[in-house]
Image (tube, rainbow, N blue to C red):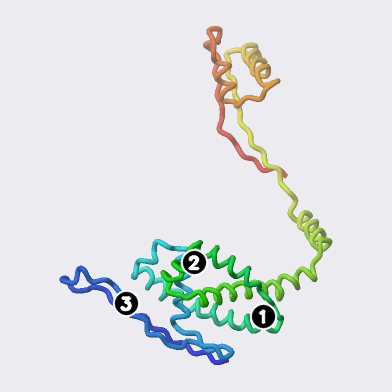
Amino acid sequence: MKIKFSFLFLLVLPFLAFADDAQPEIIINNRILATVNGKNISVFDVMKKMDVFLTRSYPEEVKSYEKCYQFYSQNWRQVLNQLIDNELILADAEKLQIKIPDAKIRETIHERFGPNVMASLDELGITLDEAWQMIYTEIAVQQVSWFRVYKKAQDKIGPQDIKVKYKDYLTHNPPKEEWKYQVLSIRAKTEQLGSIYAQKAYALIRNEPLPFEMLAKKLTEGDDVDPDITINVSDEYDVEGK
């Protein structure tokens, strides 16, 4: 495999005072960036991959040349490395004889680009064949990754292994109780008066739980409320038990 790196974006912006109506433009110097297993990866290939991502994730920024240029400049190398990795994984997929049904690719294309596929592809500047290959590559990479990584993990780790590890985790990290509480305080001039209102409060919540704010309101409603009684409700506290 031979890989060579070269990338050039030139952003032409209106910089003269009389050029108010000039539109910014991104000029691409297309060239081969890498050759993987006999397949060339060009600047256009990298751009198309980034354009699809931009359209899906940041559609509002696609029409901004400045933001597109900034995105290209910051992410082209990462996307190029991804395309290189994908080509290597595709070669692995051929060895594993992984088959992807056309119906699966067709369904994913419609999910990705919407019901009017051709109009969406024209807007992105890619052909149906290119979109087909993109989706095929994505699915193939997912399946190879599953086969090489997740399947091996599943073969080595069974339900009993997970159960043992979970018990071991609980032993070293026992669950903790969490308590939430509030305090309703009743202040009175005499102990007897305070006891009377405490019994009233208990009678109100014995059969039906009430928020303390509502309980305090009920205890202080009516014409027979003792003027020497004071009822306060604290904030809600969180306490972690053992």
- Ranked by sequence position, the earlier of labels 2 and 1 is 1
At 81% from the left and 65% from the top, the residue drawn is: 158
Amino acid at pointer 3: Leu
Q: Pinpoint residue 237: horizontal percent, then vertical percent.
A: 60, 37
At 66% from the left and 74% from the top, the residue drawn is: 100
Residue that label 3 marks: 11
Q: CA distance from mark 1 to mark 3?
A: 39 Å
At 59% from the left and 65% from the top, the residue drawn is: 107
Amino acid at pointer 1: Ala
Question: Secondary structure under badge 1?
Answer: helix
Which is in the foreground here, disc 2 or disc 1? 2
Name the quadrant containing residue 109: bottom right
Q: Where 5 sits versus 185, above or below? A: below
**Is the residue marked by circle 3 packed among few (<14), some (14-19), or many (20+) residues within 10 Å?**
some
Name the quadrant containing residue 38: bottom right
Residue furthest left in the image:
18
Question: Secondary structure under badge 3?
Answer: strand
Please state if 18 lies on the left or on the right of 192 as rendered: left
**Is the residue marked by circle 2 packed among few (<14), some (14-19), or many (20+) residues within 10 Å?**
some
Q: Pinpoint residue 67: horizontal percent, then vertical percent.
A: 37, 68
Question: Which label number is shown at residue 117?
Answer: 2
Residue that label 1 marks: 93
Please state if 158 lies on the left or on the right of 73 as rendered: right
- Ranked by sequence position, the earlier of labels 1 and 3 is 3
**Is the residue marked by circle 1 packed among few (<14), some (14-19), or many (20+) residues within 10 Å?**
some
Please state if 75 lies on the left or on the right of 108 as rendered: left
Q: Where 79 sits versus 62, above or below? A: below
Q: Pinpoint residue 59: horizontal percent, then vertical percent.
A: 42, 63
Question: Secondary structure under badge 2?
Answer: helix
- Ranked by sequence position, the earlier of labels 2 and 3 is 3
Amino acid at pointer 2: Val
Which is in the foreground here, disc 2 or disc 3? 2
